[in-house]
Amino acid sequence: MLSNWTEKEKDDLLYALQGRAAFEPPQIVSPPQPEPKTVLRAIHEWWSSEGANLRASYSRRTYPDLLSPSQLREATDRVTWFTMFALGCFHSFGRTQDGQHRSFIEAGHREGWWPELAESRPPDDVQSWLDRLERWSAPEQFDQRFLPWRRAFVDLYTIGRWLDEYREITLKLPRIIEDHGVISLNGALQPSYWAPAMRLCIDAAPINRSLGIGMNWMIREMLRHGAYDSRDSNLMAPYSWAPSLRVRDLLNELGADVGETADKEASRTIYEFIVEQIGADSARFNGDFDLPLQLITRDEHRAALDECFGAAGRDAPDFAEAEEHAEDTPAFEVAGR
């Protein structure tokens, strides 16, 4: 019957018989999101039960013996603060584990060059930096461990050159927030162009890209270890949530819409979402802030995460493990793993 019809006539007939739906792509229906309150409350319960042991093992993996973060509030020595800023910088790497940062620093401390770098005063005192570059570039240098950390040498030099200024800004952040309200961490880490730092006559090179979400990590750790007054906890809490890949995946699964990139400014969005779901007191996770979220999304705690999502009647999502297990991840033994 249709042998003499044109293709357009056939399409017109099909459209008339089946309507517009015949020509529209099928709609993909996403599964409903799990109830975020239920999942986050379950994570809070898990942390209340397991947190004491997990926070202790985390500190052992993370901090070299030469650094006690509880001393940051009063410490004026350069080694302590240089090491803390270096750890913050390393936490922006991705595809690494806590103990690897510690191993690099402890190796440098054993060999004597780490405290030399920390105590130096660039740009007038740069010999220790030149010595390190000469050593690492020598023809007999067969040791290829720690390459990502060595490549951060420019960042470490910048930290060493402006260490006193970065330390002053970090410690004064609560008072700056108190005076100015909500701040930009990217602004704070570009002090020469940031009005609050300019009023304090602080001039230093930008370090916002070097620290990345390591700045959120630093603030969290300074809160956890008492480097900020307890009265400043409310001021600093919104800035202490590092939007790592796994944490973004977890929270986006719960409907938080925290973005697809590791932007330190997303910390406030994360904090406000969690406060909205479980309240300000619970959102602090017993003073550890985002640490439970960072840990429960790792492979070793998969069973706990499954239970937390199971409480909401859903399966836990799979996370992008490339952050920790990429092929170019440096291979070496890590103390305290």
Image (tube, grey):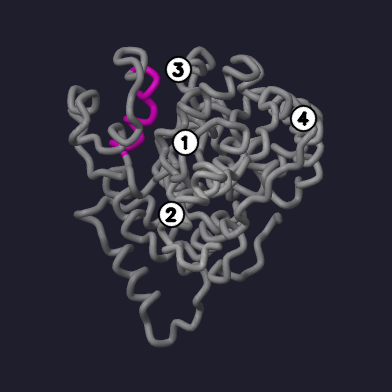
Secondary structure under badge 3?
A: helix
Say few, some or many: other residues with alpha carbon within 10 Å of mark 3 (under 14 / 14 to 19 / 20 or more): some
Q: Secondary structure at mark 2?
A: helix
The numbered disc on residue 312 is 4
- The residue under the point 69% across, 26% down is 35
* Dot 4: element: loop
Residue 21 position, x and y percent, is: 54, 43
Position above or below: 144 against 221: below
Give amino acid for label 4: Ala
Q: Depth-wise, is mark 2 or mark 4 nearer the camera?
A: 4
Disc 1 versus disc 2: distance between alpha carbons? 25 Å
Q: Residues within 10 Å of mark 2 (few under 14, many from 20)?
A: many
CA distance for labels 4 and 3: 32 Å
Q: Mark 2 and mark 1 in contact (Cβ < 8 Å)?
A: no
Q: Which residue is mark 1?
A: 216
Label pair 3/1, CB-CB below 8 angstroms: no
Residue 176, how many percent across, how many down? 32, 19
Question: Of callouts 2 and 4, which one flags the residue occurring earlier in the amino acid sequence?
Answer: 2
Q: Which residue is mark 3?
A: 235
The residue pinned by badge 2 equals 115
Q: Residue at x 70, y 41 (%)?
A: 296
The C terminus - image quarter: bottom right
Q: Earlier in the sequence, mark 3 or mark 1?
A: 1
Q: Amino acid at mark 1?
A: Asn
**Does the segment drawn in magenta span residue 63?**
no
Q: What segment is highlighted magenta in the picture?
A: 164-175
Q: Look at the magenta stretch and give its main secondary structure.
A: helix
Q: CA distance from mark 1 to mark 4?
A: 29 Å
Q: Quadrant of residue 110?
A: bottom right
Viewer-closest of 218 and 180: 180
